[in-house]
Image (cartoon, grey):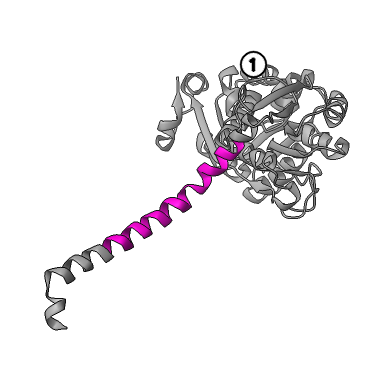
């Protein structure tokens, strides 16, 4: 036996056995890694086989912020095997910044031939929760889906709804303000009490600011035309920063906030970084395109047959930040060294 073990034949058999074992191991790894690719291929082939899917996107108002959300959804769908012009048709509806328009838009799609409805913004999600009876819904660009009416929790939600929530980093926002404005004592903000997301963010802000000893002046607005006047009133309350949160009404009236802050020589800081090219000092918020990409992948799973009731709502909040150097210079604000990588002209 010892002689055989030392023979050339035994050596060849030993190498052959090891080689076969390695091949089996590599095959197993490739099989597992290919599962995702096969799911994508299955989605693509579904359209090729005669089925073309149709999805609706309903959004509150057109703008750069909304474009990021739409692009993210489409990226996520494409990553799941659903691509416009191939096996997916996408139709869109704009509520034109008017909440009163949302129910009719959703009811129209609910009785149409779309396979899925995707909503962007809290008002559109809230509208879907109250008006959709027959279709499945995936939402994105929402601060607090539970406050919007999506359910009791991320696990226990309406059976036809799932999506991605992205709550603003309120505590980090105050950190940011205090570093940009040393000795900060008071901040002025506005919100629309008809928006559940804004009500929740303001409630959290009141608690956070109070614990830090910072006075928070809040004014309610009901329309974008009231934003300028709100900033003018806040400026008279001895504030040092104007804060425009993730409020759809406020963002619609962003130019009014910029004018009011500029006239009062106050820094304007917002949650919505896509609004910063329109004016203001800085932003700190959530990257909604990435959140929407995740939501787009959830939408792909729903189109492939998964039931939203079995899909927990996800929380995705990747922070983004930017500071405008020229505005800081105009206001005499020194940008801390730790933010130098986040500065734009």
Give 161 or 345, whichever is nearer the viewer.
161
Name which residue lies at 45% across and 31% down.
342
Give 107 or 145, whichever is nearer the viewer.
107
Residue that badge 1 annotates: 263
Rendering coords of residue 23 (x, y %): 33, 57
**Compared with residue 233, is residue 164 higher up or lower down, i.e. above or below?**
below
Q: Main secondary structure of the magenta part?
A: helix
Dot 1 lies on which element? Answer: helix
Give 209 or 194, whichever is nearer the viewer.
194
Residue 44 figure quarter: top right
Q: Is residue 265 left or right of residue 9?
A: right
Residue 20 figure quarter: bottom left
Rendering coords of residue 334 (x, y %): 45, 29
Rendering coords of residue 138 (x, y %): 72, 38
Give 45 or 8, whichever is nearer the viewer.
8
**Furthest-bottom residue in view?**
1
Asked if residue 138 shows in the view, the reply is yes
Q: How many marks?
A: 1
Figure quadrant of the N terminus: bottom left
Residue 131 figure quarter: top right
Q: Which residues are magenta?
A: 18-43
Name which residue lies at 18% across and 65% down.
12
Neighbourhood count class around disc 1 (C-alpha, 10 Å): few under 14, some 14–19, many 20 upward: few
Q: Is residue 262 left or right of residue 12?
A: right
């Amino acid at each position: 036996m010892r002689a055989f073990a030392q023979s050339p034949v035994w050596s060849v058999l030993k190498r052959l056995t090891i080689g076969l074992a390695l091949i089996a191991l590599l095959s197993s790894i490739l099989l597992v890694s290919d599962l995702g690719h096969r799911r994508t291929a299955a989605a693509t082939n579904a359209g090729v086989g005669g089925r073309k899917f149709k999805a609706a996107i309903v959004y509150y108002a057109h703008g750069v912020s909304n474009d990021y959300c739409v692009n993210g959804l489409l990226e996520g769908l494409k990553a799941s095997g659903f691509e416009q012009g191939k096996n997916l048709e996408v139709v869109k509806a704009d509520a034109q910044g008017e909440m009163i328009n949302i129910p009719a838009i959703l009811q129209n799609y609910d009785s149409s031939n779309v396979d899925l409805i995707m909503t962007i913004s809290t008002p559109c999600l809230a509208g879907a929760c109250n008006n959709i009876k027959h279709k499945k819904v995936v939402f994105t660009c929402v601060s607090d889906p539970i406050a919007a009416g999506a359910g009791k929790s991320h696990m226990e939600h309406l059976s036809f709804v799932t999506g991605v929530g992205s709550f603003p980093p309120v505590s980090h926002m105050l950190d940011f303000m205090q570093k940009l404005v040393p000795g900060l004592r008071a901040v002025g903000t506005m919100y629309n009490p008809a928006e559940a997301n804004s009500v929740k963010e303001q409630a959290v802000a009141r608690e956070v600011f109070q614990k830090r000893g910072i006075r928070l002046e809040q004014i309610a607005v009901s329309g974008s035309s009231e934003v300028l006047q709100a900033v003018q009133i806040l400026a008279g309350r001895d504030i040092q920063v104007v804060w425009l949160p993730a409020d759809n009404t406020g963002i619609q009236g962003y130019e009014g906030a910029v004018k009011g802050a500029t006239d009062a020589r106050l820094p304007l800081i917002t949650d919505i970084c896509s609004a910063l090219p329109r004016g203001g000092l800085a932003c700190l918020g959530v990257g909604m395109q990435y959140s929407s990409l995740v939501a787009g992948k959830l939408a792909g799973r729903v189109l492939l047959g998964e039931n939203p009731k079995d899909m927990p709502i996800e929380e995705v909040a990747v922070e983004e930040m930017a500071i405008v150097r020229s505005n800081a210079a105009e206001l005499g604000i020194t940008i801390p060294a730790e933010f130098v990588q986040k500065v734009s002209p």
